[in-house]
Amino acid sequence: MSKLPAYSTFITEFLREARLPRISAQEPTPDRRLIQRVAAAEDHEIAGEDGSAVRCARSLLFIAAGGLDQAHRIVQEISTNDGAYIHGMVHRIDDDFDNARYWFRRASGQPAGAEMYRRAAAGSVTVASHPIWDPFLVTDMVETSRTAGVTEELRAVLTIEFEVLLESCAGVGGEARSH
């Protein structure tokens, strides 16, 4: 990330060390130290908000660190669009593509989707070829990468998806929104 939004000190330090994006359960290699730091962090260290937003932010940090089991346990308990969307991300990373699509459908649209699309379409011909942000398209791109290899386009799209969701869940960046 070139310019970090006004994240908490914890998230800012975490992102300086994390290797993004998470392509699969093993790429990049899970970072046990970062996983432990996320597990030990207090909610107020992660984000100023309480409730599902901070749990979503924590689950995204677990994803980035490679703590997919921890992220999955958190999002299973969150009944918001963000929680369902992140749940889909966990299954996509685990190569459970049909289950990922199920959770993306359950998310019934991602409020941060317009910003994801704006950022990703600027550098991705594939994303720009669709009129809106499409997590099914991104899932197809990830699934294809398992046999064809990971492209820089996919890395960029996944990084943007993560960044925009984290900004939204951590309460930084654009307008505040309900979760």
Image (cartoon, helix red, strand yellow):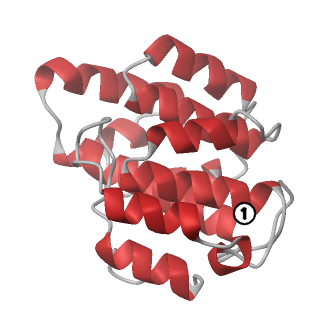
> Does 175 appear above or below 33?
below
Question: Where does residue 164 sit, x and y in percent of width and height?
Answer: 55, 61
Q: Is residue 74 left or right of residue 145?
A: right
41 to 54, vertically: above or below: below
Nearer to the camera, 83 or 120: 83
Q: Can see residue 20?
A: yes
- Total numbered labels: 1
Q: Position of residue 146 (x, y in %)?
A: 21, 22
Q: Quadrant of residue 85?
A: top right
Q: Position of residue 4 (x, y in %)?
A: 45, 82
Residue 156: image location, x then y, percent: 30, 53
| As drawn, 136 above or below 32 | above
Res 120 visible = no
Q: Secondary structure at mark 1?
A: helix
Q: Quick check: 73 above or below 118? A: above
Which residue in the protein does label 1 denote? 54
Three-letter amino acid code of the residue under disc 1: Val
Q: Residues within 10 Å of mark 1 (few under 14, many from 20)?
A: many
| Lateral position of residue 116 relative to residue 152, left or right | right
Residue 75 position by quadrant: top right
Taking the spot 60% from the left edge, 59% from the top edge, the residue there is 58
Quarter of the image for the N terminus: give it. Answer: bottom left
Residue located at (32% from left, 47% from top): 124
> For this view, does 112 lie left or right of residue 159?
right
The front one of 103 and 120 is 103
| Residue at figure coordinates x 61%, y 34% from the top left | 87
**Residue positioned 73% across, 50% down in the render:** 111
